Amino acid sequence: MSASVSNPSFHSDSSALALRRTIVSTAGWIACGIGLVLIIFPLLDIVGVVAFNGIAAINWDLFTKNTGGAGLGMANAIEGTFIITIFAMLIAVPVGVGAGIYLSEYGKNKTGSIIRFLSDVLTGTPSIVLGYFSYIVFIISFGWGFSLAAAAITIAILIVPYLARITELALQQVPNTMREAAFALGGTDATVVFKVILPAASSGVITGALLALAISVGETAPLIYTAGWSDYTWSGRFTHSPVAYLTYVIWTFIDQPDPHSHALAYAAAFLVMLVVLAINIGVRMTVKRGVK
Amino acid sequence: MKIRPFRLTVLGLSLLIPAALVAVVLFLVGYSGQAIAFNGFHFLTDVTWNLGDLYDDPVTVRGIQVPSGAEYGILVFIVGTLASSAIAILIAVPLSVGTAIFLAEAVPELERSARRSLPWLPPIRPALAMLVELVAVVPSVVFGLWGIVVLVPFLGHHISPTGNGYGLLAASIVLALMITPIIASTLYDALCQVPKENRESAFALGSTHFEVVTKAMMPMVRATLIGGIVLALGRALGETMAVLMVSGGGINILPTSLFSPISTIASFIVSQLDSAESDPTNMSVRALSQIALVLFIITLAVNAGAKLLSSGALNVRKRQ
């Protein structure tokens, strides 16, 4: 640049360079903006397609009739997703929150970091591998058949690492002075955790549980090998009785030739998206990137 | 030493996580033992997956009962998995870099100038960032539904020479959409962490805003970006439902073009449920278990790589 100062053509040179830099910068910003549009547009299109077709397909029969028989509704799938999620959460919340308590309160050591690492490995394991593992163990080795128990345990294995991690992060936000004060008042380990730390971090823990709930409602792959499929509502048995679920309706009914099956698939997709998006948007609006 | 029942209880609960992981590995290895013995290394290099004649009497090979004519080769699925994930990464990286840069740098600027004339404007950046993150929470099966009703017909009518939209490209595009938010939000967080001094000194040297981003900020977050890409790769390799629904389910033939039908390891496992159930010798269930083990090992290696890369990048990403 210093050489060009004495150059008589300084003005034209520098304005050509400046022009080039302006053009490159503008083009760069436009390219980046296009990237953002290309990722947000499909999301809006997905939500639009699912909502438009899904709302059109919603009627009372969906919630009262089964896919079996005349095949007018999908009460069995709605009920199935509901009970799989409930039982998975019943297993996963105590384990996940307990593990999170250990990692946050007593896990600043070798054991803690090994558990943390293996928990990350489990999070990274494809859900179909977990589903196939459950198939080998529960369906074949234990002889349970496609069943609620196998499905709920599989989903629980899937969501426990998330719960543990989010619980740990939430408990870490509680200031140490609160722990010290509670111990100084003579609190035992259990009272300090249950009466002081967990209540102080409850919003974070509830956030984690809700996100885990959203994951379990939206999962498909691990259920195919564990829940099976049933055209009728749950028999009330934990083993030897397959269960229906909503994501299966989306997967299989969209490939059927008749418009009625398509309507069921869209309605199922609408319900699943409603739950998943409501939870995720709600959590993000209230937490505002606090726990992450 | 004092026994502390509460600490032991929560330790016990947290040990269930490693226990589950160990059980997954042990059961997959144990159950696929006979399949590993029967298949040997051909498993990884053979193109043909043939369940054999399930109604004929089983034959005994090297002391293992298998259906007559059965052979199990998964090269096609390994190639399908790697090809679809690689193309997905190729699509996703530019998209997510653009998205992250735009969100981190351009949107605040635009917001500032817009607010001058429209002071009541609500904050735009958090809303856009949330939209990007929401892409990551859409269930896989809903992506598959969208793929079938929107993407595949579009590819079939406008792009594919054969008029059939199902195949490698459709699978890669859906995968790219699913992993872009992972890379974009990792990079976005890192860009927001770049120290103010670095940006300001680049501005002081007379750089345009875009040059500040590409020449001063991006080099600082390169390690984080690579870590995010590898993490996304791990997700893409194991993705099941969306790929299954749009990939065309090709078996026993290697893909030759972007529109060849493919299967990935994960989608093939799902599609084989019925045939595995009907094998009297149980050999196909064992072979599928061996496939699941291969997928587990691949994703484990990739995720371990991501972990190593992101731990090396901590000097930029440190938060607390």
Image: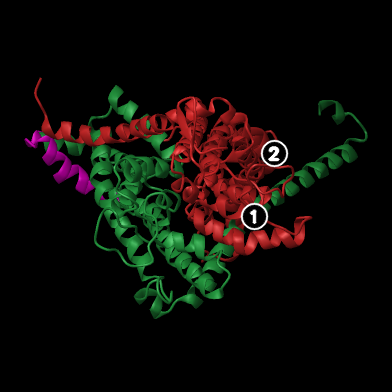
Chain colours: A green, B red
The residue at the far left in this view is A186
Q: What kind of element bears circle 2?
A: helix
Q: Is residue B39 above or below residue B51?
A: above
Q: Are marks 2 and 1 on the same chain?
A: no
The foreground one among A262 and B110 is: A262
Percent coordinates x, y for residue A136 in the rendering: 37, 40
Percent coordinates x, y for residue B227 in the rendering: 54, 33
The residue at the far right in this view is A8
**For residue A217, which numbered disc appears in the image?**
none
What's the amino acid at mark 2? Glu
What's the amino acid at mark 1? Leu
* Residue lying at 34% horizontally and 26% vertically, measured from the top left: A114
Q: Which residue is mark 1?
A: A38
Q: Quadrant of residue A113?
A: top left
The residue at the far top in this view is B1
Q: Residues within 10 Å of mark 1 (few under 14, many from 20)?
A: some
Asked whether residue A201 appears in the rendered view, the answer is no
Subunit of mark 1? A
The foreground one among B223 and B108 is: B223
Percent coordinates x, y for residue A234 in the rendering: 29, 63
The magenta-colored residue range is A184-204
Q: Is residue B187 left or right of residue A137?
A: right
Q: Which residue is mark 2?
A: B211
Q: Quadrant of residue B155?
A: bottom right
* Residue lying at 25% horizontally and 48% vertically, measured from the top left: A91
- Main SS class of the magenta portion in the image: helix
Magenta span contains residue B318: no
Asked whether residue B24 appears in the rendered view, the answer is yes
* Marks 2/1: CA–CA distance: 23 Å
The foreground one among A151 and B272 is: B272
